[in-house]
Image (cartoon, helix red, strand yellow):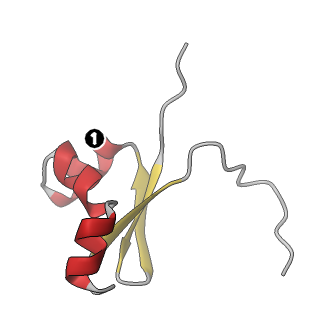
Amino acid sequence: MARKREFALYKGEELFAFGTRKELADLIGVKEKTIEFYGSPTYQRRVDGRGWAVTEITGWDKDESVSY
């Protein structure tokens, strides 16, 4: 069985939500393709950090410790 790809959705630098592209699209009322576009370098250049941003988090283990 294929693993669901999960993404984090940010508004500016603030985490807004996370889930599949479909879940994020439904949450903010846009198409899945729009969520995909929000993660593109082209969109990020256009909004210069002021708009939505999407990052894939599939494979990230929330129980892993992170040290800085």
Q: Amino acid at mark 1?
A: Lys
User: What percent of the width, then of the height, locates residue 49?
Assistant: 33, 85
Q: Quadrant of residue 65?
A: bottom right
In this rendered view, identify the residue nearer to me: 27 or 64.
64
User: What percent of the width, then of the height, locates residue 29?
Assistant: 13, 55
Left or right of residue 9, residue 44 in this image: left
User: What percent of the width, then of the height, locates residue 66?
Assistant: 82, 69
User: What percent of the width, then of the height, locates residue 56?
Assistant: 49, 52
How many numbered callouts? 1
- 31 in relation to 65, above or below: above
Q: Residue at x 19, y 45 (%)?
A: 33
Q: Residue at x 30, y 52 (%)?
A: 24
Instruction: Look at the numbered disc 1 and give the secondary structure of its residue.
Output: helix
- 12 in relation to 9, above or below: below
- 63 in relation to 33, above or below: below
Quarter of the rendering occupied by the N terminus: top right
Which residue corresponds to mark 1?
Answer: 22
Q: Quadrant of residue 17?
A: bottom left
Q: Residue at x 34, y 60 (%)?
A: 39
Q: Residues within 10 Å of mark 1 (few under 14, many from 20)?
A: some
Quarter of the rendering occupied by the C terminus: bottom right
Left or right of residue 63, residue 31 in this image: left
Residue occupying the far top of the picture: 1
Left or right of residue 52, residue 55 in this image: right
Q: Residue at x 72, y 49 (%)?
A: 61
